[in-house]
């Protein structure tokens, strides 16, 4: 059986113990406050990041891993593994995917790089699903096909507390930002084909939350929702309320609560909350 190396980037926020258990190799993206660079997950964690945002005068920026880091990793992996599968954050919002592909070519290590078209918890689930299939004895191509199928099944909806982060980070154009601010709209955002996209304009947080849960209900009541996670940017208490509501209504569904990590948090800002699942 071929030995497959699993590679991803830090935006997946996989638990370090789980990554170590399954030998998942994680390349950190960078968060930059002023002139200080921090590697996500290694030099700055989610809680520390959101605390730092309270005191820093300027919005931080982000950058992808250097190609040299990828090349070094791939050269090392080729000593032990036959092939690799790399699952990365949406290529529309980061060059990490392209850098990974170029590095694999330079290292002459066969890697199937997959654009997850998402970030955060869904990425971790794609990796774990691939590992499960590998343990079942599925072929390299069967595993790749399944993961690519999952990229089209991710549902991710979220509410941001302050549109300014998306606007300053270039994820929301100025016209959309001004319209939302002037009308005090609570935009319901989604990640569609890898891009953060305004899904609907809703006037209150309560109604926006109800709309997300309505969208989830369509899949949950038919047994088509799996790997459900409430995502939050330093908003745990509210995320816990969402979880209790979901598990109270759908006792057959197990959900998790997970952080929106530093790199994604730069763009969506503190207070953001959302829901992700796979439509199976």
Image (spheres, rainbow, N blue to C red):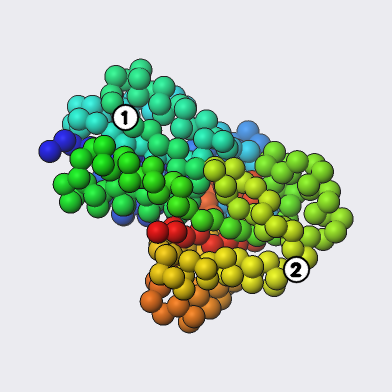
Residue 238 in picture, x, y percent from top left: 59, 71
Residue drawn at 48 percent across, 66 percent down: 219
Identify which residue, 158 or 45, lies in the foreground: 158
Tell me which corner region of the image, top left, top right, bottom left or bottom right, holds residue 194. top right
Residue drawn at 20 percent across, 27 percent down: 79
Farthest left residue?
A: 1
In screen coordinates, is 133 left or right of 253? left
Q: Quadrant of the N terminus?
A: top left
User: From what the image shows, is residue 246 above or below residue 1?
Assistant: below
Task: Label 2: state its secondary structure.
Answer: loop
User: From what the image shows, is residue 91 above or below residue 24?
Assistant: above
Identify which residue, 166 or 27, lies in the foreground: 166
Residue 50 in picture, x, y percent from top left: 60, 55
User: From what the image shows, is residue 128 above or below residue 143?
Assistant: below
Task: Label 1: state its secondary structure.
Answer: strand
Residue drawn at 59 percent across, 70 percent down: 214
Residue 84 in picture, x, y percent from top left: 28, 33
Farthest bottom residue?
A: 248
Q: State which tag comes first along the sequence, 1 or 2.
A: 1
The numbered disc on residue 103 is none
> Alpha carbon of mark 1 to alpha carbon of mark 2: how far?
45 Å
Residue drawn at 26 percent across, 37 percent down: 141
Other residues around mark 2 within 10 Å, as few (<14) / some (14–19) / many (≥20): few
Q: Quadrant of the C terminus?
A: bottom left
- Residue position for label 2: 204
- Residue position for label 1: 111
Farthest right residue?
A: 182
Other residues around mark 1 within 10 Å, as few (<14) / some (14–19) / many (≥20): many
Q: How many marks?
A: 2
Asked if residue 160 can be seen in this view, the reply is no
User: From what the image shows, is residue 233 above or below residue 148?
Assistant: below
Tell me which corner region of the image, top left, top right, bottom left or bottom right, holds residue 227. bottom left
């Amino acid at each position: 059986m071929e030995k497959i190396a699993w590679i991803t980037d830090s935006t997946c926020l996989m638990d370090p113990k789980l990554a170590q258990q399954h030998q998942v190799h994680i390349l950190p993206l960078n968060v930059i406050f002023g002139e200080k660079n921090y590697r996500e997950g290694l030099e700055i964690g989610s809680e520390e990041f959101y605390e730092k945002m309270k005191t820093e005068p300027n919005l931080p920026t982000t950058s992808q891993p250097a190609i040299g880091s990828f090349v070094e990793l791939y050269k090392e992996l080729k000593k032990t593994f036959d092939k690799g599968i790399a699952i990365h954050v949406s290529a529309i919002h980061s060059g990490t995917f392209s850098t990974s592909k170029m590095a694999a070519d330079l290292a002459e290590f066969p890697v199937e790089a997959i654009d997850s078209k998402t970030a955060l918890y869904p990425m971790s689930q794609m990796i774990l699903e691939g590992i499960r299939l590998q343990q079942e004895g599925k072929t390299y191509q069967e595993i790749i096909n399944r993961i690519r199928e999952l990229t089209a099944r991710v549902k991710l909806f979220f509410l941001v507390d302050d549109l300014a982060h998306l606007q300053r980070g270039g994820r929301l154009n100025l016209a959309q930002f001004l319209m939302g601010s002037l009308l005090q709209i609570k935009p319901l955002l989604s990640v569609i084909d890898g891009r953060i996209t305004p899904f609907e304009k809703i006037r209150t947080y309560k109604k926006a939350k109800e709309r997300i849960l309505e969208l989830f209900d369509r899949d949950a009541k038919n047994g088509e929702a799996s790997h459900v996670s409430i995502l939050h940017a330093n908003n745990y208490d509210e995320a816990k309320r969402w979880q209790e509501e979901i598990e109270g209504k759908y006792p057959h569904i197990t959900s998790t609560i997970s952080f929106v990590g530093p790199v994604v948090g730069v763009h969506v800002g503190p207070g953001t909350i959302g829901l992700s699942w796979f439509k199976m």
